[in-house]
Amino acid sequence: MLNELSQFFTSMSLFLLQLVPGLLVTVEIFTFTLLIAIPLGVIFALGKISRFKIVVHIIDLYVWIMRGTPLMLQLIFFYFGAINIGLNLSRFVVVLVVFVLNYAAYFAEIFRAGIQAVDRSQYEGADVLGLSFWQTMRYIILPQAIKKILPPLANEIITLVKDTTLAQVVGVVELFATVKVTVIRDFVIYPFIIAALFYLMFTQIITKLVAVLERYYAHYE
């Protein structure tokens, strides 16, 4: 019995060490996507409510395509598309580009809805104060919009955590891909449980951070 427990803990320790590179890749995909896609989403949201019809139509088409097709299909399309046109991009770069473009489209719709939910009187008040469009957005509209969109934004960010598993379709070895290799090789189930705990911990951290942000933006009620 003691020998079996010793073997189990030894294999568990080795597995956790093997998990580290895949976990780091998952965190990198999540972090870079979030840091780039959220600002892009804000820019696209402002473009969607602008007076320039051509900009509105282009962004509408982009959002329609990115939200209307599966992320897995986009990954495969961009990966093989890059190869076909001679672009020498690493698999990781392709994953980042596709994730950013996909999530920027979703964030654009979330921010657009939040901005348009702010009462028009706020714009009028900013105009009376002599604020420029960008000052109005930065100091008055966006803080109120963020307060309104935090719940759907949090849901989308949690979805991003789970979507990182799709990176494996173009050969990027992230957390779940590492787990699958171990399960198939050793025919054991505990790696799935450990992976589930990592994802649950990740989403719990996001939930707590969003709760902090909700309290911070509560004074914009």
Image: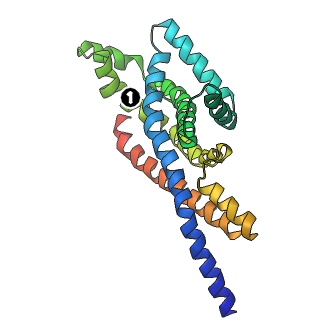
Residue at the left extreme of this rendering: 130
Give the residue pinned by disc 1: 142
Residue 54: x %, y % from top left: 52, 7
Q: Is 67 placed left or right of 117 in the picture?
A: right
Query: Which quadrant, please, contains the C terminus?
Result: top left
Q: Toward the viewer: 1 or 64?
A: 1
Q: Is 145 placed left or right of 2 in the picture?
A: left
Q: Say what secondary structure mark 1 lies in.
A: helix
- The residue lying at 48 percent from left, 55 percent from top is 205
Compared with 111, 96 (above or below) is below
Compared with 139, 168 (above or below) is below
Compared with 193, 173 (above or below) is above
Residue 61: x %, y % from top left: 60, 17
- The residue lying at 50 percent from left, 11 percent from top is 55
Amino acid residing under circle 1: Leu
Q: Toward the viewer: 191 or 217?
A: 191
Can you tell which quarter of the image residue 42 is in?
top left
Residue 151: x %, y % from top left: 52, 40
Residue 188 can be seen in this image: no
How many marks the image carries: the answer is 1
Can you tell which quarter of the image residue 220 is in?
top left
Q: Is 143 placed left or right of 208 in the picture?
A: left
Q: Toward the viewer: 136 or 86?
A: 86
